[in-house]
Amino acid sequence: MEDKRNIQIIEWEHLDKKKFYVFGVAMTMMIRVSVYPFTLIRTRLQVQKGKSLYHGTFDAFIKILRADGVTGLYRGFLVNTFTLISGQCYVTTYELTRKFVADYSQSNTVKSLVAGGSASLVAQSITVPIDVVSQHLMMQRRGEKMGRFQVRGNPEGQGVVAFGQTKDIIRQILRVDGVRGFYRGYVASLLTYIPNSAVWWPFYHFYAEQLSCLCPKECPHIVFQAISGPLAAATASILTNPMDVIRTRVQVEGKNSIILTFRQLMAEEGPWGLMKGLSARIISATPSTIVIVVGYESLKKLSLRPELVDSRHCYQRFTDCYKCFYQLQPEMTQRIYDKFITQLQTSIWEEISEIKAEGNLEAVLNALDTIVEEGKDRKEPAWRPSGIPEKDLRSIMVPYFLQQRDALQRCVQKQEAENRQLADAVLAGRRQVEELQLQGQAQWQAWQALHREQKELVTTLREPE
């Protein structure tokens, strides 16, 4: 049976926040550039009636590329880049929520579920207005429109002007729906992305743990994570795609009711209508999730505080020594390790303090510093081997032996002085004992003499007259 691999999770308190945010923005921007065309295709597939315009993901890609060129695949991209703010809010909320939930539950699944849902709630509150504008821009086609609003064309009627599109869409939304129009589909977005995020993180850790049991030990952890991310994304996409279709139609077509939109979609296209754009969503999610997972895990490793880099390797070796216990109680193992390290550091500092106090270590080190400073001005060459092993050995060992001899002599002299003190004390005790014995004998003789006198007196008193 193969041992389960230890995949350590880097928590919020382990990160250098400055590095984390700087690298995070750059990574998120690269990801959005790579997957935005598939996001645009997915949105158009979900909004179209049946297969009136596009027959699938690849067909939509070819037609958009022929009609509008490469720029057509990036309509609304500049507006969508403002979601970088929500992305950083998402990550921050996720990590802080995990830290908070850890005080109540040590289950990684529970922490991921709660943190993922909470992070989506915060992120969607920022993202929905940006999504509404960018989705309307995605719906703009050369010569016609797919959504509710149409931006103005150039004087020659050739397509859409390069600038002012966003401003036009914002004005039309304000004129028709007011400020509330920017939060159209907000509830639908929450019902889509909160479950999506809440499902993705637990499945991500679940797939990583299962793959760690199946793959050989030599397989790097990043491979498990790169495979687990798309698997979790596909699972979450299948579960939440019906709500994502409804959300897109509510935001683009101006629907006011999720239930009415659902009924209309079922009446027009049946249950399969709820799965529209699923392939595009999975295709866009697969590379983006791989990049996100690999980038996010690499980002967290790059953002580790310097003092914790070596500590992670020590923790890895520690868990290798207690694999069975770590598999059963990973959180408990982490707490035991932290307590052990704290006690070890305290013990080391106490021992260093004792050595400094007993051996006057500070004075010795200061003397060595003085010798080094004095030696800087000396021009004679440093010691070099002579080439004769016996001579070199004597030059190194004799001073050491002489030092040891002097140390032993000091110890012997100290012991001899202590022995002399003990001998003097013993002799003094003996003399005191002899004096006490003489005093005892004298008192005994005096008592005997007194006893004889008393007997003679008693005898004399008893004689008759």
Image: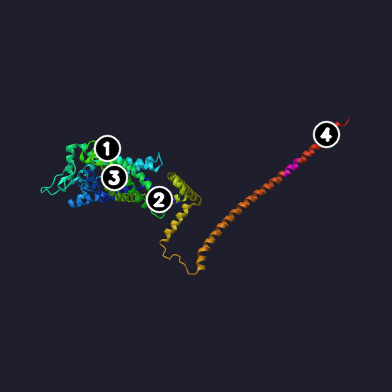
Instruction: Say which mark, if any, is on residue 457.
Output: 4
* SS for callout 4: helix
Residue in the foreground of this view, choosing between 363 and 335: 335
* Inter-mark Cα distance, 1 to 4: 130 Å
Query: Upstream in the sequence, badge 2 or badge 4?
Result: 2
Image quadrant where residue 149 sits:
top left
Query: For mark 1, what is the residue?
Result: 187
Instruction: Say which mark, if any, is on residue 87.
Output: 3
Query: Upstream in the sequence, badge 2 or badge 1?
Result: 1
Screen quadrant of the C terminus: top right
* SS for callout 1: helix
Q: Is residue 441 magenta?
A: yes
Q: Does the magenta stretch include residue 318?
A: no
- Callout 3: 10 Å neighbours few (<14), some, many (20+)? many
Query: For mark 2, what is the residue?
Result: 212
Which range of residues does the magenta coloring cover? 437-443
Query: Upstream in the sequence, badge 2 or badge 3?
Result: 3
